[in-house]
Image (tube, rainbow, N blue to C red):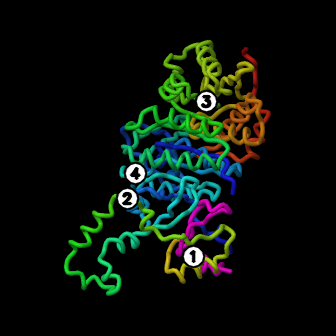
Amino acid sequence: MKVSDVMVYDISAVFEDDTVERAVDIMERHVVSGVPVVDEDMRVVGFVTEADIMRASIPSYFTLLQSASFLPDTDQFMKNVLKIRDHKVSEYMSKPPIVVKADSTLIYTADLMMRHNIKTIPVVDDEGRLIGIVTKIGILKAALKGELE
Amino acid sequence: MNLKVLTVTLNPALDREMFIDDFQVNRLHRILRSDRSILSPGGKGVNVSVALANFGVPSVATGFLGGYMGRILIEELRRTSNLITTNFVFIKGETRENIAIIDEKNHTITEINSPGPLIEDIDLDHLMRRYTMSLSRVELVVISGSVPESLGSDVYVKLVRVAREKGKTVFMEVRDRHISTLYENDALPDVIKPDFRMEYRLLRKSLETTDDFIEQAKKLIERGSKLVVLSYQVDKDLIVTSDGVWLIKPKVGVEISHILGTGDTYMAAMVYRYLSGIRDMLDVGRFGYIAALAKTKKAKKKPPSLQEIEEFSDKYILERVI
């Protein structure tokens, strides 16, 4: 099975110069945890997730400790979130983006998701322009029907 | 996949069609079968995307969606066809719900359309960027339907101008207040189908006689539009091009309670014909009419197939008026 069989034909995205606050608004309204970041030609230049924003807002030692119980209070987090609110989303997105083509296999796509621990991958055309997304749940549904190969 | 068409629906709706025989106000009606109450994605541009998918034409649908209704609409639209790519800007407000009560026994249709949500400037800016970006990937744009009250007609002027700058063909079905603004701002589309559902009015003039219809349509042609299609009476239309004016009417009876969605089928069929390389605008308008006629044989909003349209290819009369 190919990505084109299970992908969502949606090209919702944020632009490189959109703010962090705008990206969070869009994720919240779309009820998604991450969105592709595109340039003016619709080429995918990155992918930003709520985790990227969280990571950018917490003290760096927290990522090493990997537990909120080590945070003395939430003040630091709040201050950092407000500090980056108006920053460009391109500063915090994952780049270069992990992308697949519509004719990529689901096995290859599932492998990418597991290796990079991601839930959504943008699907691009030959020019790198966004044409949709493929999600972990889409692949799981195909797997449950025995249609992954 | 070459997307070919961009449809713009600034005020989409979740459409609820209810089939109730002997419908009366101030009375309880129970719907006993699930297929007599149907929920579907709606709004003129969205409907055009659905009809185009039915004809095998891929399109990208853009506009504003919001809230619970917006999420249902987009899910339903995705289920409809993989030939529709969605590119909506999600807003804070709630997408509206439109209701149509169809009484096939008494041949009536009662429609209740809501006004739509508030659109913030930041969301409009985002839509304009995504619209401009999507335009570079399509051949033609369809802009149809109402505008949320907070925006006004100026937004249509902007959309048409950007499309023109990018050399795209523009088809529109909108109400006269928008057409008049486009006319006054020298931003007319290539194809116009005025939405006369609320009133027979064009370029701020009330239309009463056939001459009124023709006179006003000709002003649009003189200002650069290539085709104007006017719903002259329920089942009769006027097709106006730079080559003349024609009256088109059916040879077969038209079921009035089945007219929901005919305008959008009309528009989609004209787009389909135009994309197939036809530049004789009378032919484009005529094909739209035939498709709309085929749609009236279907009770539900679902558009006809190309084969069903073909069956109506000799079920009309075309008369030259001028």
Residue with the mark numbered 2 = A25
The residue nearer to you, when weighing B203 against A77, is: A77
Residue B140, x across and y down, in percent: 65, 42
Judged by depth in the image, the label closer to the viewer, 1 or 3, is: 3
How far separated are the C-alphas under marks 2 and 3? 36 Å
Q: In the image, are marks 2 and 3 on the same chain?
A: no
Tell me the quarter of the picture where residue A146 sits. bottom right
Q: Considering only order in the chain, which callout, 3 or 4, is on the residue closer to the N terminus?
A: 4
Using the image, determine if residue B113 lies above or below residue B80: above
Which chain hosts label 1? Answer: A
Residue drawn at the location 53% of the way across and 21% of the way down: B202
Residue B212, x across and y down, in percent: 58, 14
How far separated are the C-alphas under marks 1 and 2? 28 Å
Residue with the mark numbered 1 = A141
* Mark 4 neighbour class, 10 Å CA radius: few under 14, some 14 to 19, many 20 or more: many
Judged by depth in the image, the label closer to the viewer, 2 or 3, is: 2
Residue with the mark numbered 4 = B91
SS state under label 4? strand
The residue nearer to you, when weighing B25 against B61, is: B61
Residue A33 seen in this snapshot: no
Residue B33 seen in this snapshot: yes
SS state under label 2? helix
Q: Residue furthest bottom?
A: A65
Which chain hosts label 4? Answer: B
The residue nearer to you, when weighing B217 against A133, is: A133
Q: Considering only order in the chain, which callout, 2 or 1, is on the residue closer to the N terminus?
A: 2
The residue type indicated by label 1 comes to: Lys
Residue B192, labelled with which disc? Answer: 3
Q: Which residues are magenta?
A: A121-149
Residue drawn at the location 61% of the way across and 59% of the way down: A129
